[in-house]
Image (spheres, rainbow, N blue to C red):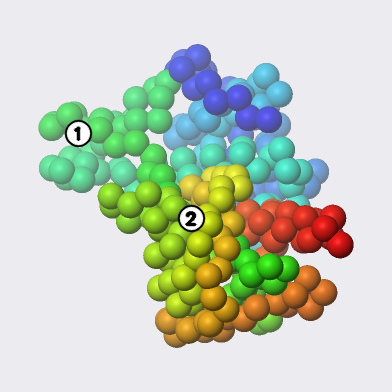
Amino acid sequence: MLTRDIRTLANCHEGYLIRIGEHGIADNGQGGILQPRARWPDGAIAIGYWDNAPVAVLSEQGDEQWPPARHWLGTLPEKSFGLLSTALQIVRWAQDHRFCGRCGKRMRRRPGEFMMACPSCSFRSYPRISPCIITLVTWRDQLLLARSPRFPAGRFSTLAGFIEPGESAEEAVRREVFEEVGVQVGRVSYFKSQSWPMPHSFMMGFYAEAASRDIQIDGIEIEAADWFTTDQLPGLPPSYSISSALIENFLRGSAARE
């Protein structure tokens, strides 16, 4: 697993390297993303330790043939998810915060921490994290699944949305479910969370019990939604996503009750 200790890496200049390009992430020749331990090129950002060895990420133009991030999320071992998620989000932060959002001067990255400081007005920038809820709505042994216009053909998934200012996660669950499919929910229970690097979401997973089965989609974010039984499911989200974990956990519980 990734050990998140970058304070001790302030003066480190060698170790593993992850190379992230405009179209994907470089293969190390052995079906992985960690390039062999060597001196880091200029611009590399240390993100922690992997198997007790320093690891950094480098943003570069790269090659069009490099496999995309979603390929790696689906093929790497589960323990590598945090490593890849961190690398992707740190690269995005470094790209998006090169200039001060207050005065426009070029920012300077401070070694040993994920922070950029403006030399002119002292404004500080940290990696952006966007809190979201992702919810599986249930009615007895049925699941409410929906599809976005962005999904591949045939795929349905759980409902999700960003938490708004001043809102609790549970309030966001109730609002998002009602806005997207017109369903009021009763009891809401927390499942688990996942850092989602597309591009910088922090997903908090919930189960929500529906108070009615009537569905009225918004027609914008959701183009179709329906109730499904455990033996008649549509195409589901990829196994590495928290939406898949929500569904699989519910299916295991349903099978145990039978």
Residue 16, given in percent of the width and then of the height, sits at 64, 29
Please say if 227 is above or below 138: below
Q: Are marks 2 and 1 in contact (CB under 8 Å)?
A: no
- What amino acid type should be assigned to the residue bearing mark 1? Phe
- Residue 177: image location, x then y, percent: 47, 68
The residue depicted at 50 percent of the width and 66 percent of the height is: 185
Alpha-carbon span between mark 2 and mark 1: 30 Å
What amino acid is found at the position of numbered circle 2 in the picture?
A: Ile
Q: Quadrant of residue 28?
A: top right
**Kind of element beneath mark 1:** loop
Q: Residue at horizontal 19%, vertical 34%? A: 123
- Give the position of the N terminus as an image quadrant: top right
Q: Position of residue 149 (x, y in %)?
A: 53, 80
Looking at the rendered structure, the number of numbered marks drawn on it comes to 2
> Residue 121 falls in which quadrant of the image?
top left
Q: Which residue is mark 1?
A: 123
Which is in the foreground here, disc 2 or disc 1?
Answer: 2
| Residue drawn at x 61%, y 38% as measured from the top left | 83
Q: Horizontal placement of 247 versus 128: left or right?
A: right
Q: Pick the quarter of the image with the C terminus.
A: bottom right
Viewer-proximal residue among 14 and 165: 165
Q: Is residue 142 above or below residue 223?
A: above
User: Which of the 4 quarters of the picture holds residue 242?
Assistant: bottom right
Viewer-closest of 231 and 48: 231
Query: As displayed, is residue 176 above or below residue 49?
Result: below
Mark sitting earlier along the chain (2/1): 1
Residue 110 visible to an observer of this rendering: yes
- 126 and 25: which is toward the camera: 126
Mark number for residue 133? 2
